[in-house]
Image (cartoon, rainbow, N blue to C red):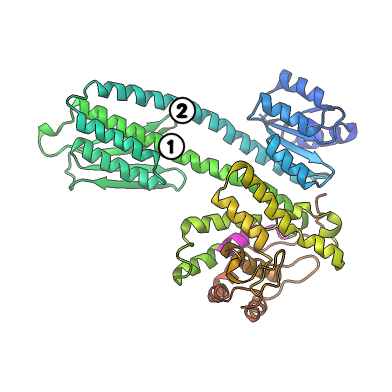
Amino acid sequence: MNPKILFVEDSDDVRAGVARMLSRRFDVCATRTAEEAVVAFDREGPFPVVLSDYGLPGMDGIALLAEVHRHAPETVGVLLTGVADLDLAVSAVHETGVFRFLTKPCGYESMVQAIDEALRHHASLVAAEDDAEEITFERDSFASLRESLEERVATQKHALARLHEFSVELCSAGSLQEVVDLAARATHEALGRAALVQVWDDGDSATVEASAGPEMTARLHSQPMTTRDGQIGAIIVDLGHSNRGLLAQVDLALLTSIASSTAVTAHHEFRRRERDRAQHATILALARLAEHRDNETGKHLQRLAAYCRLIAMGLIEEGKHTDIVNESWIRDLELSSALHDIGKVGIPDSILLKPAKLTPEEWEIMKSHSSIGESTLAGVIAEFGPTRFLVMGRDIAGGHHEKWDGSGYPRGVRGVRIPLAARILALVDVYDALTSERPYKKAWPHHEAIAWIRERAGVHFDPELTATFLACESQLDRIRGGLADEINADRVPVG
């Protein structure tokens, strides 16, 4: 069956036309007003996605989606409006749980893409609810087992103490490998036997493992690690050479407890990564909204992320900025690079899409996208707390048009006072702009773009970063070729 969506539009012609088009892919219930939509939601819902016009008679689209969110938090809202208003977009995302903000007129493909992404987000929210039930179930199971073990505390003080220590250690584990290492050591120390712990990482399609204790014999006991989704790994314990090596019931209970705790923690690590990806996708949706308004090159963000990783890896190989740059920092840089022009959501179309040269007054407005993007992300951080991803995105949005000699904007910051991530983005953004074809210009050849950037080292660009950039020029050219765009001259910008 096609996914069910609720579509709310007060124009009869628009409502009929859009509903007819969307019915190719979805089971569409269409209403004219928000009040009718509430009734339809109660009668025919729940709906995974509600697509609503903002300017409805009576209750507007934001109020409707807020009402839906109160009664069905897992339902995902997509808002349509004829006004490109940054404050409206931010308030819709933060206050009512709106997932996407689309500017009218919006093409069929863009609308279908937004609904498909909303359906995937709905699936992740439903999965999160299931995870909460699973956590309660497994926590209760663990508590019951711990109570049973405590009855034998007189003979198992050491093992129980180690089990408690293991539980505390799991709470501070920062990675799947650390969870596995802790489980191997805890098993060895609690049972006094060699142990091998294996977890099958469903995200990376690999096995993460660790061992503790002496070399193992051929007589082994395998304790599966399971969650409600099935087995995710095993703890293998050495039984030794003699029959006396068989595990006693109390040892089996200890091993079961360690396996259960390890499975729950590993499963939560999988889900944490999924939630992080969902959070990133929500923030990046706003970035893509800015990108789609004026950027004809669909793979621009992919290229920037790849260029950023290449330059950052070059810094590691050259031993530069080792106090800052590591794999975690590089992952944040790849994600945050997409936020560099998020402030363009606040630039009027008359300026953003103007085919002619901007006037001095218009150019000042265009330059304000850096400050708009920085302040927008700073507001998100202030309200919801800092994350490395958002803090770096704020620095990039506000600093990627600053220049090494202080002649950039918006503040005229110079040298190393410009954040490292913004200095990297400044390089790769200019390189991509020069080498990308647009409807109004031809792409520069790679060697000409490289020469232009080389001439501006120490003026526009950080000279040290420029040297690393130039050392990677052949890889840059391969990335550029592999992620080249196909220009569609007939494309009409949305909005």
Q: Which mark is residue 397?
A: none
Q: Quadrant of residue 4?
A: top right
Q: Quadrant of residue 24?
A: top right
Crowd around label 1: few <14 · some 14–19 · many ≥20 (10 Å)? many
Asked whether residue 358 is in view, the answer is no
Label 1 and label 2: CA atoms lie apart by 10 Å
Sequence-wise, the earlier of marks 1 and 2 is 2
Q: Residue at x 40, y 23 (%)?
A: 140
State the image coordinates of residue 286 (x, y, percent, origin top left).
69, 48
Position of 239 compared to 472: left or right? left
Numbered disc 2: secondary structure: helix
Q: Residue at x 45, y 69 (%)?
A: 317
Are dots 1 and 2 in contact, CB under 8 Å? yes
State the image coordinates of residue 283 (x, y, percent, origin top left).
64, 47
Q: Is residue 304 magenta?
A: yes
Q: Residue at x 33, y 46 (%)?
A: 209
Q: Which residues are magenta?
A: 297-308
Numbered disc 1: secondary structure: helix
| In the image, residue 252 above or below residue 444 | above
Q: Amino acid at mark 2?
A: Glu
Q: Quadrant of residue 243?
A: top left
Q: Which mark is residue 134?
A: 2
| In the image, residue 377 above or below residue 77 | below
Position of 341 compared to 468: left or right? right
Q: Which mark is residue 267?
A: 1
Q: Which residue is most to the top?
A: 43
Magenta portion: prevailing SS class = helix
